Image (tube, rainbow, N blue to C red):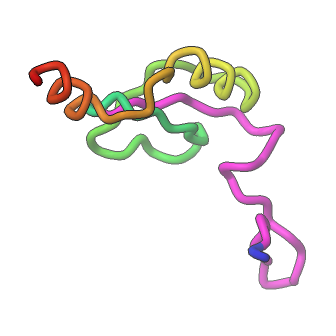
């Protein structure tokens, strides 16, 4: 089983920044309309843009659940429409 925590040099647990329920997050979307929960203190990676937040983890997850209703990449959705 993989731990959600890493350890500091003193051995105390450091929470995974993507799992911290008390942190602030963004929702990112890429060109394929794939969504990602992203901690606000980490730079937004190239190819992604912010579409929601800064907000709580729960608010961001709720946004993703309501907005990302089709998990297929945008290119696949468009290719299937052409058939």
Q: Is residue 34 left or right of residue 79?
A: right
Asked if residue 31 is among those painted magenta in the image, a careful observer would answer no
As drawn, which residue projects farthest toward the front?
83
Q: Residue at x 20, y 32 (%)?
A: 75
Of residues 4 and 25, the one nearer the viewer is 4
Determine whether, in the image, residue 67 is placed left or right of residue 50: right
Residue reaching furthest top? 66
Q: Nearer the viewer, residue 79 or 40?
A: 79
For this rendering, which residue is in front, 69 or 43?
69
Residue bounds of the magenta highlight:
3-30
Counting from the top left corner in percent of width and height, residue 19 is at 74, 49
- Residue 49 found in image quarter: top left
- Asked whether, in this view, residue 72 is left or right of residue 57, the answer is left
Q: Up-down: is 31 above or below 4?
A: above
**The N terminus - image quarter:** bottom right
Residue at horizontal 49 percent and vertical 23 percent from the top: 68
- The mark tally for this picture is 0
x and y percentages locating residue 48 in the rendered image = 34, 36
Across and down, in percent, residue 58 comes to 76, 27
Q: Is residue 51 above or below residue 6?
A: above
Which image quadrant is residue 79 in? top left
Q: Is residue 23 magenta?
A: yes
Residue at image location 50% in from the left, 21% down from the top: 69
| Quadrant including the C terminus | top left
**Residue shown at 51% from the left, 16% from the top:** 67
Above or below: residue 23 compared with residue 7: above
Viewed as shown, does residue 25 lie left or right of 35?
A: right
């Amino acid at each position: 089983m993989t731990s959600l925590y890493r350890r500091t040099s003193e051995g105390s647990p450091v929470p995974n920044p993507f799992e911290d329920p008390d942190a602030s997050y963004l929702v990112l979307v890429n060109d394929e309309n794939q969504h990602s929960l992203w901690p606000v203190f980490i730079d937004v990676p190239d190819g992604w843009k912010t579409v929601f937040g800064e907000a709580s983890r729960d608010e961001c997850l709720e946004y993703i659940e309501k907005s990302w209703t089709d998990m297929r990449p945008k290119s696949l959705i468009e290719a299937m429409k052409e058939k």
